[in-house]
Image (cartoon, rainbow, N blue to C red):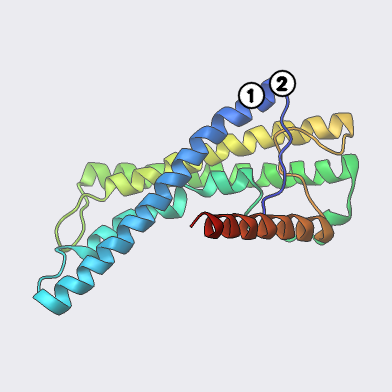
Amino acid sequence: MSAPPVVEDGSRLSQADRAIFRLERYLALTGGIVILALMLLAVAQIVGRKLFNAPVPGFIDWVEQFMAVFAFLGISYCQRLGGHIRMDIVVGLLRGRALWGAEFLSALVMLLLTLALTLGSWRHFLRAYENGDSSIDIALPTWPAKLLVPVALGILALRLALQLWGYWRGVRSGTDRPVAVPLIEDAAAQAAQEAESMTFAGNGTRAEGGIR
């Protein structure tokens, strides 16, 4: 599925949006690399156990700790692109100031919830750090994974604050394309973008075949 477009310009809001997006892309890439590493680790675990009777020490412990990386590091990146699951049957019917006002209220609720979760997860990290919590098998310290949660949620909170700024500007101006927020597209526009992306992928495949 293609991501909704995000308008950019020379404003401070757009500059802040692009700066944070660079960090979000790096974190999302890190999460993807960790997923690949865990897949290779799982292969090593299976091959080592079946062929050499030598499984990876603490395999479950490693998986449990690294789950926080790919589960949380991409959450803000997904929010910037409007990729989180949402119900927009009613919101999709709105236009102009009414639409951006509804999006503003939605982002405000998400920001308040995110701040509460950030505070709670930070306290959970502190308890793990002060008590020296560790995994059961090979005694991996659990605080690094628990620290990732409030860090990722803090970045999400910053993203939501920027989107609140963007939605507020949309409410004030009444524009159809406010800056630094994912724009809502109808089903026809989404289908056209997906068809275009599939066509581009097909052309790239044929081009590679021709070179070979």
Residue drawn 78% across and 32% down? 168
- Percent position of residue 206, x then y: 59, 60
- Percent position of residue 9, x then y: 73, 26
Q: Is disc 2 surrounded by few (<14), some (14 to 19) or many (20+) residues within 10 Å?
A: few
Q: Is residue 158 above or below residue 15?
A: below
**Residue 51 in view (yes/no):** yes
Residue 19 located left or right of residue 118: right
As shown in the figure, which amino acid type bears the numbered disc 2? Ser
Residue drawn 61% across and 46% down? 79
As shown in the figure, which amino acid type bears the numbered disc 1? Gln
The answer to which of 141 and 34 lies nearer the viewer is: 34
Residue marked by disc 1: 15
Labels 1 & 2 near each other (Cβ < 8 A): yes
Q: Which image quadrant: the N terminus? A: bottom right
Residue 105 located left or right of residue 37: right
Spatial distance from mark 1 to mark 2, Cα to Cα?
6 Å
Q: Is residue 152 above or below residue 165?
A: below
The answer to which of 125 and 56 lies nearer the viewer is: 56
Q: Secondary structure at mark 1?
A: helix
- Percent position of residue 37, x then y: 31, 56
Residue marked by disc 2: 11
**Quadrant in which residue 27 is drawn:** top left
